[in-house]
Image: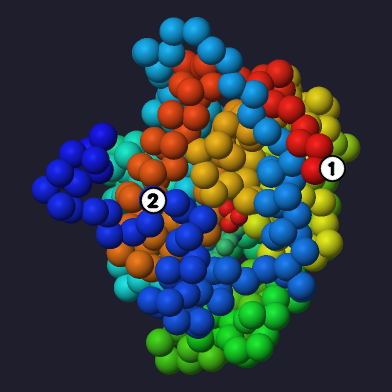
Amino acid sequence: YEIYLNGMTGAVPRLPTDLTRLEEVAEQRLGPGPVGYVAGSAGSGRTAEANRKALDRWQIVPRMLRDVQRRDLSVELLGARLPAPLALAPVGVLSIMHPDAEPAAARAAAAQGVPFVLSSASSTPMEEVAEAMGEAERWFQLYWPKDREVTKSLLGRAKAAGYTALFVTLDTWLLAWRPRDLDQAYLPFLHGVGTANYFTDPAFQAGLAKPVHEDRDAAVLHFVRMFADPAKTWDDLAFLREHWDGPIVLKGILHPDDARRAADAGMDGIVVSNHGGRQVNGSIGAADALPGVVRAVGDRLTVLFDSGIRTGDDIFKALALGARGVLLGRPYAYGLGLDGQPGVEHVIRSVLAEFDLTLALSGHTAPGQLTPDALTRANA
Ligand code: FNR
């Protein structure tokens, strides 16, 4: 109603309220460079398409006359009470989109009480972002480095800075074949962007012959070598458990057997995700993987979902399929690029308002009421 009331004075929103149009507007206003980084998918983009198709194949079947006057969107996730089943996904190197970068996204999320999962590949050190997060829940995403000392040091810093849950991304030991970045021959890390957490890290610095400011190229190469470790296996999770005493969430699970292994390893949660279609071109649409994973482990750990969420009804569908919460990726990165902190707030508020209305108009008053019964498979 705020938007309609403002409209009485002639004011209309600065950004589209249909979040599926943000990419188009960003492309016009920000140009192909930054938008290529965010929009880009692996290979021919099949998986990013599959993410959308997988959500679109489901349709909501609204129910009537069920008193939906009072609604409560809040949920308990990973030991925290949240105002809604939504968090901002970790997106690295946000300075590409806007000079205010991660602190602006963090402030926007905090203003709505929504957790911002800070990428370990952020362009701002985690301590600075933690301050911007204020009272909001602080979650940290780890690209798990080869070097144990650096891993321990990053985890120690995250703990000291007040981050509670650790999201460990499993699908990015190598960067996929991403044509939009390849065609521009642009990898932010090679320009020393997105390395802030490492360049400020004592354990990382200890591996350098000269300080970062004296030989940046050597520091960047050191980062590229130790940033991820494709040799890791399930056995290595014990090391993380030993060095992180809060909830651990494995991000990038698609197979029910992997979900079972995560539960067997004592993990607290998983994110069913294909990294927004940025890693394995041709892989399963994330929402197609969700029901099988929920059947396998839904009662053993917290199942979260991302990849393809654009609207409130997408959130509804993911929850009805058994996710306990969702992460939003590209839309808030476009919001940031287009309008800084207010742009991210616009995205969060729009998607949550739409989710609230979808919930109510289809006969529900709380996320916990959603079950597969609220959906039907489209015929097309
Ligand atoms: C990502 N994603 C990501 N994931 C992660 O664990 N660490 C990271 O640093 C990044 N960086 C990143 C950059 C950009 C530009 C994008 C678009 C995505 C993946 C992200 O967390 C999430 O899984 C997807 O973005 C979800 O899909 P949608 O919502 O973008 O479709």
Disc 1 is placed on an element classified as loop
Q: Is residue 69 left or right of residue 194?
A: left
Q: Is residue 184 left or right of residue 65?
A: right
Q: Which residue is situated farthest in the left direction here?
A: 9
Quadrant of picture, ligand 1:
bottom right
How is the rendered protein coloured? rainbow
Looking at the image, residue 51 lies above or below residue 255: below
How many numbered discs? Answer: 2
The answer to whether the residues at label 2 and label 1 have Cβ atoms under 8 Å apart is no
On the image, the x and y values in percent for residue 30 come to 40, 77
**For mark 1, what is the residue?**
255
> Residue 138 falls in which quadrant of the image?
top left
Which residue is found at the position 40% from the left and 17% from the top? 71
Which residue is found at the position 85% from the left and 36% from the top? 256
Q: Residues within 10 Å of mark 2 (few under 14, many from 20)?
A: some
**Location of the N terminus (image quadrant):** top left
Q: Is residue 129 left or right of residue 149?
A: left
Q: Nearer the viewer, residue 196 or 61?
A: 61
Going from N to C along the chain, the mark reached first, 2 or 1, is 2
Disc 1 marks a residue whose amino acid type is His
Disc 2 marks a residue whose amino acid type is Thr
